[in-house]
C-alpha cells in the first residue's frame, strides 16, 4: 500500500508517467487489485513515449507479452542513445531468449562490451551467447574477464 501511495505521489509531483504507471500496475497486480492494474495499463498505453527512458520502460514492460513490440521500443531507445546500457542489455535478452536469434544477440552483446568493457554482467551475458553458438573457448575467455571484474551473484549465475 505504501509503495502504491509513493507512486501516486510521484505522479502528482511530475515523475515520468510511463515509468510510474508501469511500476504501479505491477504493484497493484501484486496486491490483487486487478481493476487498478488495468487502469494503470490503460493509462500507460495512452502515454506517447518520447525519451530514451520512455522507450526503455515501455519495451521492458512488453518483453513477456509482446517481444516484437518490446524490441521495437528498445531499438527506438537506441536510436536516441546508442550507448543506452539498459536498452542494449534488454535487446540482447529479447533476441537471445525470446527470438532464439543468438547471432543477433551476440552483435548487441558485443556492443555492450565495447561500450562498457568493465561491466561484468555484460561480459558474462556475452559469454552465454557465445556458448549457445558453440564458441566454447571464446565463452570461457569472456567469463574469465567477467570474473576478474566481479564475483557478484549475477556473474556467478551466468558463469554456471
Image (cartoon, rainbow, N blue to C red):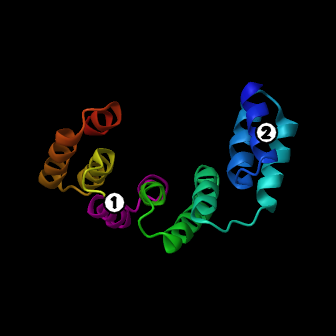
The answer to whether residue 25 is left or right of residue 128 is right
Residue 1 in percent (x, y) is at 77, 25
Mark 2 is surrounded, within 10 Å at the Cα level, by few (under 14), some (14 to 19) or many (20 or more) other residues, namely few
- State which region is magenta: 93-115
- Is residue 121 or residue 68 the one in the foreground? 121
Residue 122 relative to residue 26: left or right = left
Seen from this angle, which residue lies furthest bottom? 79
Nearest to viewer (mark 1 / mark 2): 2
Residue 32: image quadrant is: top right
Q: Mark yes or no: residue 66 visible.
A: no
Quadrant in the rendering for residue 45: bottom right
Residue plotted at (64% across, 57% down): 58
At 32% from the left and 45% from the top, the residue drawn is 121
Nearest the eye: 53 or 154: 53
Q: Which residue is mark 2?
A: 9
In percent of width and height, residue 155 lies at 29, 38
The quarter in which the C terminus is drawn is top left
Q: Determine which of the numbered discs, if any, sits on residue 112 in the image.
A: 1
User: Chief secondary structure of the magenta span?
Assistant: helix
Which residue occupies 30% across, 57% down?
116
Callout 1 touching callout 2 (CB < 8 Å): no
Name the residue at 16% across, 40% down: 148
Amino acid at each position: 500500500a505504501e509503495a502504491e501511495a509513493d507512486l501516486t505521489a510521484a505522479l502528482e509531483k511530475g515523475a515520468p508517467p510511463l515509468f510510474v504507471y508501469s511500476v504501479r500496475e505491477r504493484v497493484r497486480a501484486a496486491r490483487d487489485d486487478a481493476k487498478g492494474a488495468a487502469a494503470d495499463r490503460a493509462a500507460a498505453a495512452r502515454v506517447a513515449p518520447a525519451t530514451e527512458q520512455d522507450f526503455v520502460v515501455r519495451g521492458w514492460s512488453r518483453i513477456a507479452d509482446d517481444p516484437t513490440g518490446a524490441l521495437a521500443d528498445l531499438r527506438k531507445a537506441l536510436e536516441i542513445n546508442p550507448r543506452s546500457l539498459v536498452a542494449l542489455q534488454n535487446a540482447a535478452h529479447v533476441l537471445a531468449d525470446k527470438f532464439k536469434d543468438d547471432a543477433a544477440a551476440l552483435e548487441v552483446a558485443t556492443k555492450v562490451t565495447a561500450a562498457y568493457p568493465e561491466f561484468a554482467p555484460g561480459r558474462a551475458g556475452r559469454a552465454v551467447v557465445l556458448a549457445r553458438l558453440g564458441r566454447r573457448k571464446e565463452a570461457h575467455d569472456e567469463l574469465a574477464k567477467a570474473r576478474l571484474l566481479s564475483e557478484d551473484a549475477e556473474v556467478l549465475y551466468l558463469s554456471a
